[in-house]
Image (cartoon, rainbow, N blue to C red):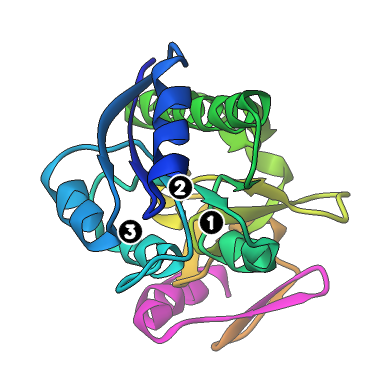
Amino acid sequence: MILNCIAVDDEPLALGLVCKFIQQTPFLNLVNRFNSSTEALRAIHEQKIDLIFLDIQMPDLNGMELARLLENVPSQPRVIFTTAYNQFAIEGFKVDALDYLLKPFSYEDFLRASQKALNYAELANRQTTVETAPAEPKDDYIFLKVEYQLVRVELSDILYIESLKDYVKVWLKGKDRALLSLTSLKVLEEKLPAKRFMRVHRSFIISLENITSINKTSVQINKTIITVGEQYKQAFADFLNKWA
C-alpha cells in the first residue's frame, strides 16, 4: 500500500527535511509541499490525501486548527504533527493525531511514525473489506478492529455497545474493560442480528438477551442503566409490548 502525503511547514529547512524523509520512504508518495496551512487545506479538498505531516506554529491558520477542520474532509486524512513545541502533545491527542514528532527528529523517528500510519491504513482497508462482505446469518460472531488486529467476538458475550466519537466500546460478559474498536455504531447496527440486538439511543446498542431489567424509559444490563433516546422510543415500546 502507498500513502499519498503532503508536508506543511512555514520553515523552509524543516519542510525540506520532511520532504526528503518522505521521498526516501518506499510506502510514502509526496504529492505536494506547502508553507501555508490555508493553501494545504485547499489542496486537501481537491485531491485524495492519506497522510499529512503538519507543523503546528504557523501564521494565519495554525496546524492544530487545520487538524480540526479535517473532520469535514471526505477522505479523512490522518495527521502526524512535526513541531518544536512539546506543550501541544495533549491537544494533538484530542484531534486524533497518529503521532507527534518533536523537532529535531531523526529518520528513525520519522519512519516509526510513518509505519504507524501505514499499519492504520492497512487495518482500515481490511476492515472496509470485512464490512462490505456479504452477511452470513448463521455466524454467531463478528470481527472487531482492535488496535492493529481483527478480534473475533462471540455475539452471546456482548452486553452492550457504546459510541465514542470514531470508536465504539464493546462491553463483554466477565470483562472489567471494554474492547475499543475503530468503527461506528451504525456499521455495527447493520452487522448485528436485529432479533438479538437493538439500538435504544444514538450512543448505545444493547443485547436483548442480556437485559437484567426494563421499563418504559430505560434498560438495565448488570449494573448499567441505559436511557432510551427519544427517536428510539416507539421501536422500544413495540419491543416492550412483546417482551412483557
Q: Mark 1 and mark 2 in contact? Answer it, CB < 8 Å.
A: yes
Residue 45 at what x, y percent from top left?
Answer: 16, 51
- Give amino acid for label 2: Val
- Give amino acid for label 1: Asp
Taking 7 as reference, is 168 left or right?
Answer: right
Can residue 136 be seen? no
Numbered disc in front, either 1 or 2: 2
Residue 212 at what x, y percent from top left?
Answer: 76, 69
Task: Kindly identify which numbered label has been placed on residue 70.
Answer: 3
Can residue 63 be seen? yes
Whole-number angstrom distance, CA of label 1 to CA of label 3: 11 Å
- Give amino acid for label 3: Leu
Q: Mark 2 and mark 3 in contact? Answer it, CB < 8 Å.
A: yes
Residue at x-position 61% and y-position 56%: 84
Q: Is residue 93 above or below residue 79?
A: below
Residue 225 magenta-highlighted: yes
Residue at x-position 54% and y-position 29%: 114
Crowdedness near tag 3: few (<14), some (14–19) or many (≥20) residues, C-alpha within 10 Å: some
Residue 227 or residue 241, whichever sits in front: 227
Image quadrant holding the C terminus, namely bottom right
Task: Kindly identify which numbered label has been placed on residue 79.
Answer: 2
Residue at x-position 48% and y-position 24%: 21
Residue 243 or residue 91, whichever sits in front: 91
Q: Which stretch appears magenta?
A: 219-244
**Which tag, 1 or 3, sits closer to the chain's start?**
3
Residue occupied by mark 1: 96
Residue 196 at what x, y percent from top left?
Answer: 54, 50
Residue 67 or residue 16, whichever sits in front: 16
Q: Is residue 32 above or below residue 235?
A: above
Task: Kindly identify which numbered label has been placed on residue 15.
Answer: none
Taking 29 as reference, is 20 left or right?
Answer: right
Taking 117 as reference, is 219 left or right?
Answer: right
